[in-house]
């Protein structure tokens, strides 16, 4: 009887490295390791050799950087989606893409199960498994970290040493790192104490703002239909654009995020992120929308963006609601054309200019100079009508007294 085949989402980190021998031992199965390069792979040969040396039957590595940006990260940018107003969904955006490709590989390999290295108290387990269920409900799902005997990362490290598995995590540097072109998520170790400031060695993409250059750096970013296309007038494809913004932002200490967020399963978690390029784009995109969107559309889109971010965070990328919201968001982006000028200085990202052929700003209405065309006398009638409900309510309460 043929052995069961399991396609494992493989990062090369501690959890998934331990998962390969553990799955083979406990399920008597062949393990096919799948890795998506979303901007985190520095040496393809190292991760390839490591997966096979750890016991994988086969190894898949796909360059999905451009697809990740165009079809996932830039969609979140268009939506202005930040979970709880701060988190740019670094890991959350990558999971549905990885899971989607794992399903496709599983069908090519005639595998019977899908596996991931997410823990039972995190969000990634939901993101992976909801995508698996939506796209391949017939396949079995295995989550080793919810089943195995290890109670801590220290126990996993000891197991890895016994099995001669090469790992980067140590007892002295126990950080769990998840990186892609949109940013990096940093967990574990001292970061689990919300009172203690993250040590500098935790950060992967940015230098300390106090070590950033003593001079201001200016750049211009141009958008077409809400999508970034140029830096300082030069057109860049998505991957090159993000790499350049990450480099510029990182050198200026831009994009560090330290929050206590509400995980989907109900616990609070201290999270540290770096997203230099992404946060530059969110700030620039917001500035341009404020210039070209009318007030009502802008206000409603903020509500839609908040919900869109929740859906991504909660693992519901492949859902009818997200697809429906996508249509509204796309409509709002039809006139988001223009250029935004930004200034960087020691961790600060400051909007200093914006322009668009679709700008709704009219200086002759906003100015207080002699060129003012606004009829100030009309304001009295506006206030009388706008304040009528307040006036009626005030009169009624006075009578009641």
Image: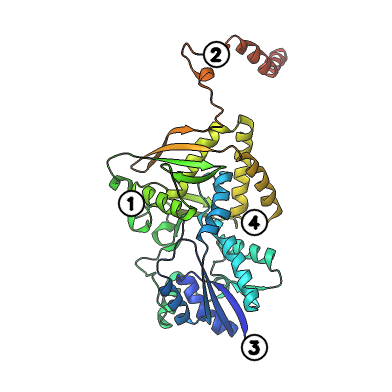
Secondary element type, mark 1? loop
The answer to whether residue 47 shows anywhere in this view is yes
For marks 4 and 3, give the CA distance: 34 Å
**SS under mark 2:** loop
| Mark 4 vs 3: CB contact within 8 A | no
Taking the image as drawn, is residue 274 in sight?
no
Spatial distance from mark 1 to mark 3, Cα to Cα? Answer: 52 Å
Q: Quote the CA–CA distance across marks 2 and 4.
A: 49 Å
Q: Which of marks 2 and 4 is nearer the N terminus?
A: 4
For mark 4, give the secondary structure.
loop
Q: Which residue lies furthest to the front in this view?
A: 234
Mark toward the start of the polypeptide (4 vs 3)? 3
Question: Can you say which quadrant of the picture contains the C terminus?
Answer: top right
Residue under pointer 2: 373
Colour treatment of the image: rainbow
Instruction: Give the percent coordinates (x, y) of residue 361.
Output: 53, 26
For image coordinates 54% across by 50% down, the residue present is 74
Of circles 3 and 2, the one toward us is 2
Q: Residue 379 carries which label?
A: none
Q: Would you call the spot at circle 1 few (<14 residues within 10 Å), some (14-19), or many (20 or more)?
A: some
Give the label, 1 or 2, closer to the camera: 2
Tag 3 residue: 2
Question: What residue is disc 4 on?
Answer: 316
Which residue sits at x=45%, y=42%? 221
Give the mark, 1 or 2, whose residue is nearer the N terminus: 1
């Amino acid at each position: 009887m043929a052995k069961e085949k399991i396609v494992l989402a493989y990062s090369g980190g501690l959890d998934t490295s331990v998962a390969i021998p553990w799955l083979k031992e406990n399920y008597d199965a062949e393990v096919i390791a799948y890795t998506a390069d979303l901007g985190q792979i520095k040496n393809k040969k190292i991760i390839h050799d490591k997966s096979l040396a750890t016991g994988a039957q086969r190894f898949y590595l796909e360059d999905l950087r451009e697809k990740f940006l165009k079809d996932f990260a830039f969609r979140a940018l268009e939506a202005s989606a930040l979970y709880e107003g701060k988190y740019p969904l670094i890991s959350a955006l990558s999971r549905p893409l990885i899971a989607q490709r794992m399903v496709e590989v599983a069908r090519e390999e005639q595998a019977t199960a899908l596996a991931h290295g997410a823990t039972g108290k995190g969000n990634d387990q939901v993101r992976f498994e909801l995508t698996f269920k939506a796209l391949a409900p017939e396949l079995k799902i295995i989550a080793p970290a919810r089943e195995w005997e290890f109670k801590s990362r220290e126990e996993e490290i000891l197991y890895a040493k016994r099995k001669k598995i090469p790992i980067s995590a140590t007892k002295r540097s126990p950080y769990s790192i998840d990186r892609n072109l949109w940013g990096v998520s940093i967990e574990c170790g001292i970061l689990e104490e919300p009172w203690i400031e993250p040590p500098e060695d935790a950060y992967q993409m940015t230098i300390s703002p106090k070590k950033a250059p003593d001079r201001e750096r200016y750049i211009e970013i141009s958008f077409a239909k809400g999508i970034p296309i140029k830096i300082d007038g030069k057109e860049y494809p998505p991957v090159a654009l993000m790499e350049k913004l990450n480099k510029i932002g990182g050198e200026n200490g831009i994009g560090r995020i330290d929050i206590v967020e509400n995980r989907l399963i109900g616990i609070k978690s201290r999270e540290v992120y770096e997203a230099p390029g992404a946060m530059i784009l969110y700030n620039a995109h917001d500035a341009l929308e404020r210039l070209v969107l009318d007030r009502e559309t802008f206000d409603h889109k903020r509500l839609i963006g908040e919900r869109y971010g929740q859906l991504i965070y909660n693992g519901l990328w492949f859902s009818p609601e997200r697809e429906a919201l996508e249509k509204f968001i796309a409509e709002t982006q039809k006139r988001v054309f223009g250029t935004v000028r930004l200034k960087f200085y020691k961790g600060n990202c400051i909007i200093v200019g914006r322009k668009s052929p679709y700008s709704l700003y009219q200086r002759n209405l906003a100015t207080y100079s002699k060129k003012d065309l606004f009829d100030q006398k009309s304001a009295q009638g506006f206030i009388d009508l706008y304040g009528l409900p307040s006036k009626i309510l005030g009169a009624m309460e006075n009578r009641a007294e």
